[in-house]
Amino acid sequence: MKKIFEDKRILLINMLFLVVTFVFDICLLVTHNRYVFKTIASVLFVICGIVNFVLVYGQDKRNKLFGWFMLAGLVFACAGDILLIDFFIPGAISFAIGHVFFFIAYSMLHKINWKDLLISLAIFAVALVVILALPVFDYGSMLPIVIVYAFIISCMLGKAISNFAFDKENRGQNFIIILGSLLFFLSDLMLLFNVFSTISDPHNIFDIICLVLYYPAEILLASSIYHANIKVKAENKMLSESVDKK
C-alpha cells in the first residue's frame, strides 16, 4: 500500500481535485444553487478521472480497460447528478448504469467469482431490511426502482469488498476502490433518507451528509484509475532492469 504514495505528483494532483471539488460542494450546501455548483463539482471528478487515465494510458491492456470502464462509470454518475436536480428517475437510471460500469471495471482487476455473489447478496439483504422494514419511508410507486437500484449498488460494493479481501496482489488499489465504493453506498443511503423519509429534517442533515460523502467517493474512484496501474509499472520496471543487466 505504500506504493500509492510513492508518486507525489499524482497524489498532489488528486488532492487538489479533492480540495477544489469540496470547495464547490460547500458552495452548493451554502447557496443551494444545484444548477451551477453541483454541475461544476460533478464535472470536476470526471476531469480527475480523465487526468488519471491520461497519465497511465498505454501501459497495460487489461488496466486500460479498467480505466475505460471507470471513466464510463464517472460520466454516468456525473449525468445522474445533473439529472437528479429536476428528474429523479432518469437520474437514478444513470447512476445505476454507472454502478454497472464500476462493477465491470472492478472485475477487470479480479475475475468474478462466487464470493462476490455471497458478499453482494449479504449487503443487499441488509439494504432490503432498511428499505422495507424501517417505518420511516414512503416510496409510493418508486419502490421497485429503489429495490433494483439497491441491488445494483450492493453488487458494486460487494465486488469491491471481495477484491480487497481476496486479491492479495492489489491491496493498495483495492483499498482506494473499497473506500470510494463504501462512501458512495453510504451517500446513497443518505439520499434515500433525504428523498423518501417521513422524518422531519429542517436543517437538511441527510442532504448535507449525502453530499459530504459523495464527492470524496467519486474523487477516490477517479484516482483509482491511476493507482490500479502501479503494480504494472513496477513489473515493467523490474523487467526493464532485468533486460539491461543481460
Image (cartoon, helix red, strand yellow):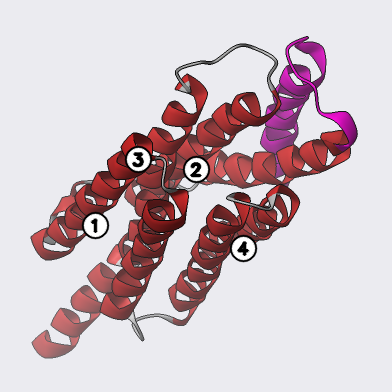
The residue beneath circle 3 is 31
Q: Position of residue 165 (x, y in %)?
A: 50, 37
Quadrant of res 148: top right
Q: CA distance from mark 4 to mark 2?
A: 13 Å
Residue 103 horizontal side relative to residue 163, left or right? right
Q: Residue at x 52, y 46 (%)?
A: 163
- What's under tag 4, amino acid-wise? Phe
Q: Residue at x 33, y 58 (%)?
A: 223
The reply to whether dot 4 and dot 2 touch (C-beta < 8 Å) is no
Q: Position of residue 111 (x, y in %)?
A: 62, 59
The residue beneath circle 2 is 181
Q: Position of residue 120 (x, y in %)?
A: 69, 37
Q: CA distance from mark 3 to mark 2?
A: 28 Å
Q: CA distance from mark 3 to mark 1?
A: 21 Å
225 is higher (above) or lower (below) than 240: above
Question: What is the crowding at mark 4: few (fewer than 14 residues within 10 Å), some, or many (at least 20)?
Answer: many
- What's under tag 2, amino acid-wise? Ser
- Disc 1 element: helix
Q: Residue at x 40, y 64 (%)?
A: 43
Residue 176 horizontal side relative to residue 76, left or right? left
Q: Position of residue 159 (x, y in %)?
A: 60, 46
The residue beneath circle 1 is 17
The reply to whether dot 3 and dot 1 touch (C-beta < 8 Å) is no
The residue beneath circle 4 is 101
Q: Earlier in the sequence, mark 2 or mark 1?
A: 1
Residue closer to the observer: 52 or 208: 208
239 is higher (above) or lower (below) than 175: below
- What's under tag 1, amino acid-wise? Phe
235 is higher (above) or lower (below) than 181: below
Q: What stretch of residues is rendered in magenta?
A: 114-141
Let me know if residue 213 appears in the view.
yes
